[in-house]
Image (spheres, rainbow, N blue to C red):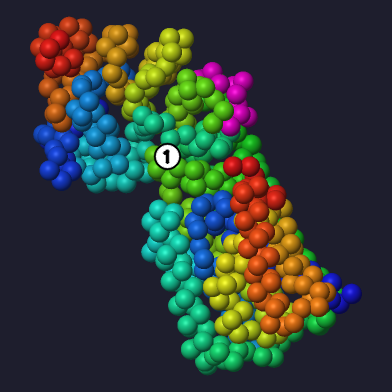
């Protein structure tokens, strides 16, 4: 049972990061490959705050604010650029972030990582096991999903869609495109930071590899396969992709085979999706 | 001081002079048509007035305010809005959302309000939908309100462009070839629409190719040639001018 709960907790955490990516990439069309870096900022910020004795909820809030600020500040110089160029600058952000996670040893513990992150505790109740932490991750996903839904339903959400479809037309109708993009990078950063903080609190150990470029690509794959622009897609994708390693553990593969086989299956699913269902399983048809 | 003043505007793109010493002014609540052969600078002057390109020299003044170096956003607030020759609709959004996104009111265009005050935001959304509906009704697309823009006919798309530009609440509307590519019925509808806009108190500056249409809609005509204003005057004078006709239709005509 613990095995299943653990899977659900991780899938929910990644669903939060996927929602963050979906907002940026699917809705506004800002293609970022730095989501893991932002998630990492949230995770490290939470770890440092929690270690300093800050209680769980304020530490989460702090982590979200820091991740939001980092996302906005790193995105700001390139938000004026048209879609495709953003990929390059966000790639740079991701690489720099990984280098910082490895080298800023005082805060991050360097390549060896940060062990012993304090467990989540709210009103004196500790959430240690997967079954217990499931409450926290579910409530967090619920809140993030609800806010994502409200956001997309609002006039601001329509504006974000419009920016993806034709930025010049949006500017020509008097909207401030840059301001809207800054707003969305803050929200998306906060979501990713929330995912990162939950990850740190749940696993209680983080290292730079947990937030490297592969994780960014994994999250993008989740959004592409799950489906862009919809809430269901952002939740379905992580559950599906994280289930694959779990299923593979049931097969009796040697430890050297598991990694490549997993990549192979991701690749196959991606190709199948691109050919037969380019909008993703639960995406809005293109 | 006139309503809209364009004074001494020059714009070069590399070796090409798009606009050369362009000076004219227009009066409020009229329909002014810009005509001229291809490459005459018609769209360029639109881009200068709406802030899509900055002129090398010269100025744009609207109701006494110098707008030359101001942002596109500020120009719309001042009361100038435009449509595009290639429409630039939000094809994957509904007719309603296309107009809603262009409403002058900034209420609800804020992520924090949307997330933390959902009920308040819902009220804003309802009010904005109501407002957008009015503009859609003006252009006669009420029956298509929930259709995606991409599923409209070309004529309907052009009417939707009008609804969008109306939604900005601007008083001076710059329409870039509103009638091009329209079949007879849609064309008549658009001509009626343009007259209706004038009746609603709007001032219009329109790029128009078809001289028949110009006769039907224009109060005055501005004739552009090679990036400069060649003549401005009453529609009949300009349209029936033999010399201008020769330039417009080519030397052999």
Q: Quadrant of the C terminus of chain B?
A: top left
Q: Is residue B180 left or right of residue A42?
A: left
Q: Residue at x 28, y 37 (%)?
A: B47
Q: Residue furthest right?
A: A1
Q: Position of residue A83 (x, y in %)?
A: 44, 54
Q: In this view of the protein, which residue sits in the foreground, A26 or B24?
A: A26
Q: Chain of mark 1?
A: A
Q: Residue at x 42, y 39 (%)?
A: A169
- Helix, strand or loop for the magenta stretch, by majority: loop
Q: Quadrant of the N terminus of chain B?
A: top left
Residue B144 magenta-drawn?
yes
Give the magenta range.
B138-148
Q: Is residue A194 left or right of residue A164?
A: right
- Examine the rendering and report whether any part of residue A201 can be seen: no
Q: Position of residue B109 (x, y in %)?
A: 53, 47
Q: Is residue A163 left or right of residue A131?
A: left
As drawn, B222 above or below A44: above
Residue A161: quadrant of the picture: top right
The number of numbered discs placed on residues in the rendered structure image is: 1
Q: Position of residue A198 (x, y in %)?
A: 69, 75
Q: Residue at x 54, y 73 (%)?
A: A213
- Examine the rendering and report whether any part of residue A268 can be seen: yes
Residue A119: quadrant of the picture: bottom right
Mark 1 element type: helix
**Which residue matches tag 1?**
A169
């Amino acid at each position: 049972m613990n095995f299943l709960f653990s899977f659900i907790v991780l899938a929910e955490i990644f669903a939060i990061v996927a929602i963050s990516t979906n907002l940026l990439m699917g809705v506004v069309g800002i293609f970022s490959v730095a989501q893991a870096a932002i998630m990492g900022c949230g995770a490290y910020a939470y770890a440092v705050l929690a270690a300093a004795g800050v209680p769980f909820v304020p530490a989460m809030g702090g982590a979200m604010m820091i991740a939001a600020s980092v996302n906005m500040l790193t995105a700001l110089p390139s938000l004026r650029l048209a879609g495709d160029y953003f990929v390059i600058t966000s790639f740079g952000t991701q690489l720099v972030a990984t280098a910082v996670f490895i080298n800023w040893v005082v805060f991050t513990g360097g390549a060896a990582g940060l062990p012993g992150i304090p467990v989540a505790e709210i009103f004196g109740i500790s959430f240690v096991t997967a079954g217990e932490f499931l409450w926290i991750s579910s409530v967090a996903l619920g809140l993030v999903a609800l806010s994502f839904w409200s956001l997309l339903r609002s006039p601001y959400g329509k504006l974000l869609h419009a920016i993806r479809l034709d930025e010049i037309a949006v500017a020509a109708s008097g909207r401030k495109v840059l301001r809207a993009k800054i707003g969305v990078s803050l929200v998306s950063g906060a979501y990713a930071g929330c995912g990162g903080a939950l990850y740190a609190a749940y696993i209680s150990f983080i290292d730079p590899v947990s937030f490297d470029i592969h994780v960014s690509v994994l999250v993008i794959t989740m959004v592409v396969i799950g489906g862009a622009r919809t809430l269901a897609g952002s939740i379905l994708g992580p559950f599906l992709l994280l289930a694959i390693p779990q299923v593979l553990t049931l097969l009796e593969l040697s430890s050297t085979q598991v990694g490549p086989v997993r990549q192979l299956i991701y690749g196959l699913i991606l190709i199948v999706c691109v050919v037969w269902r380019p909008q993703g399983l639960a995406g809005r048809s293109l | 001081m006139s309503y809209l003043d364009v004074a001494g505007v020059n714009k070069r793109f590399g070796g090409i002079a798009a606009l050369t010493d362009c000076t004219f002014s227009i009066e409020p609540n009229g329909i002014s048509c810009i005509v001229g052969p291809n490459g005459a600078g018609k769209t360029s002057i639109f881009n200068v007035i709406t802030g899509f390109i900055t002129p090398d020299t010269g100025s744009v003044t609207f109701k006494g305010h110098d707008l030359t170096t101001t942002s596109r956003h500020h120009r719309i607030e001042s009361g100038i809005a435009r449509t595009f020759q290639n429409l630039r609709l939000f094809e994957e959004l509904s007719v309603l959302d296309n107009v809603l996104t262009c409403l002058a009111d900034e209420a609800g265009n804020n992520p924090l309000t949307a997330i933390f005050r959902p009920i308040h935001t819902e009220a804003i959304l309802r009010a904005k939908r109501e407002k957008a509906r009015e503009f859609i009704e003006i252009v006669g697309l009420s029956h298509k309100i929930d259709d995606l823009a991409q599923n409209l006919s070309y004529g309907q798309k052009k009417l939707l462009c009008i609804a969008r530009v109306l939604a900005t609440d601007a008083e001076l509307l710059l329409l870039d070839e509103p009638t091009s590519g329209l079949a007879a019925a849609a064309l008549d509808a658009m001509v009626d629409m343009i007259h209706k806009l004038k009746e609603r108190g709007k001032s219009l500056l329109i790029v128009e190719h078809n001289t028949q249409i110009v006769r039907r809609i224009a109060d005055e005509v501005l004739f552009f040639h090679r990036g400069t204003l060649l003549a401005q005057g009453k529609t009949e004078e300009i349209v029936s001018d033999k010399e201008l006709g020769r330039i417009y239709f080519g030397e052999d005509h």
